[in-house]
Image (spheres, rainbow, N blue to C red):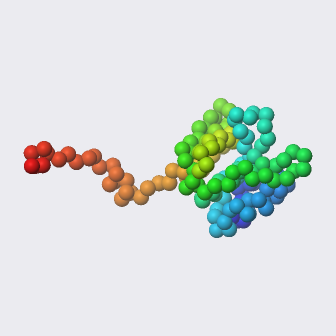
Amino acid sequence: MFSRTFLPATAEAGLPMAAVSRHMHVMRRCVEPDDGAVLVSRCTRPDRPLGREYLMVLTYKRLVVTQETRVLRQMRLHLNTELRHLGNVVWHPDQRLGAVEFAATAIDGVRERFLIKVAQPKQVWHLDALLSHVFKPKTPLTQRSVTMEPPRLVSPLGAY
């Protein structure tokens, strides 16, 4: 599943195959074969605007972020975590900048922030939809109706 979904996701992001193939061996070690890739994108750290680029891969179960060293072009794993171990996941689409800022707290308590830039403004909303699909799963109608009911008040007269 991962092999079938990873390459189309990289093509959708417009990433060159040479760069993707360098990261592929690290990704295969981190992601289970039956997990599908939802998003593959280059990203930067907003707190380091002139810093290096990272490659982010989001699947239905994991978030993996790798970085390529400048001199030897070796792959370095920056973040590898299951989605259930992420806390306080937020993202802010900004159509003016053509980017989405993504932030999450890892299990070790470190707050990770990434800026994902896209080529066209309409891709910002597509990226927002992908993140919503993974991090805000829809609840079935039966669960929504139970949680949407107003609380029932008990009469104080009936309590005695």
Q: Residue furthest top?
A: 96
Quadrant for residue 96, please give it.
top right
Work out whether residue 29 can be spotted.
yes
The picture places residue 15, in percent across and down from the top left corner, at 78, 50
What residue is drawn where x is 64% and y is 62%?
A: 36
Name the residue located 14 percent from the left edge and 45 percent from the top edge: 155
Q: Is residue 118 visible?
A: no
Nearer the observer, 135 or 12? 135
Q: Residue furthest right?
A: 71
The one nearer the camera, 138 or 113, is 113
Left or right side of 139 for 86 = right
Query: Could you tell me how many numbered marks the image carries?
Result: 0
Please, is residue 30 above or below residue 124 in the view? below
Q: Position of residue 133 (x, y in %)?
A: 55, 52
Residue 98 rendering spot, x and y as whole percentages: 68, 36
Image quadrant holding the N terminus, namely: bottom right
